[in-house]
Amino acid sequence: MANQATDLEIAQQAKLKHIQDIAESLGLQEDEWEPYGRYKAKLSLTH
């Protein structure tokens, strides 16, 4: 049986996308999300 990658190895190999690019691809308006750095954000539950 081949060795499986650990969670850490998988996470280290992941290519992160900028949160603004993700928000735009989802069609979110600027007032519907708040960036917390380059790679994460909080979404508004009121929209």
Image (cartoon, rainbow, N blue to C red):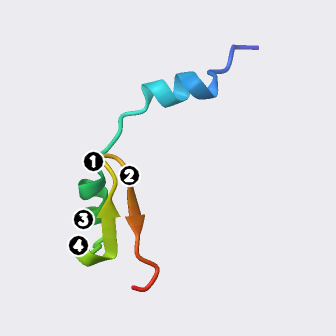
Amino acid type, residue under disc 4 in the picture = Glu
Q: Residues within 10 Å of mark 2 (few under 14, many from 20)?
A: some
Disc 2 versus disc 1: nearer the observer: 2
Residue at image x 46%, y 79%?
A: 45
Count of marks overlaid on the render: 4
Quick one: SS at disc 1?
A: loop
State the residue at coordinates (24%, 55%). Answer: 21
Give SS at disc 4: helix
Cα separation, mark 3 vs mark 1, equals 10 Å
Compare residues 31 and 24 and report the one nearer the observer: 31
Please identify the quadrant where the C terminus is shown.
bottom left
Give the residue displayed 32% in from the left and 65% down from the top. 34
Instruction: Give the residue at mark 3.
Output: 24
**Residues at circles 4 and 3 in contact by the CB criterion of under 8 Å:** no
Marks 2 and 4, how far apart at CA? 14 Å
Amino acid carrying mark 3 in the image: Glu
The quadrant of the image that shows the N terminus is top right
Q: Name the spot of residue 19 as percent of width and height, x first.
A: 30, 53
Q: Is residue 17 above or below residue 35?
A: above
Residue furthest out toward the right: 1
Tell me if 10 is positioned left or right of 7 in this view. left
Mark 4, residue position = 30
In x, y percent, where is residue 44? Answer: 41, 76
Residue occupied by mark 1: 18
Mark seen at residue 40: 2
> How far separated are the C-alphas under marks 2 and 1?
8 Å
- Could you tell me the amino acid type at mark 2? Lys
Residue 6, by quadrant, is top right
Work out whether residue 26 can be spotted: no
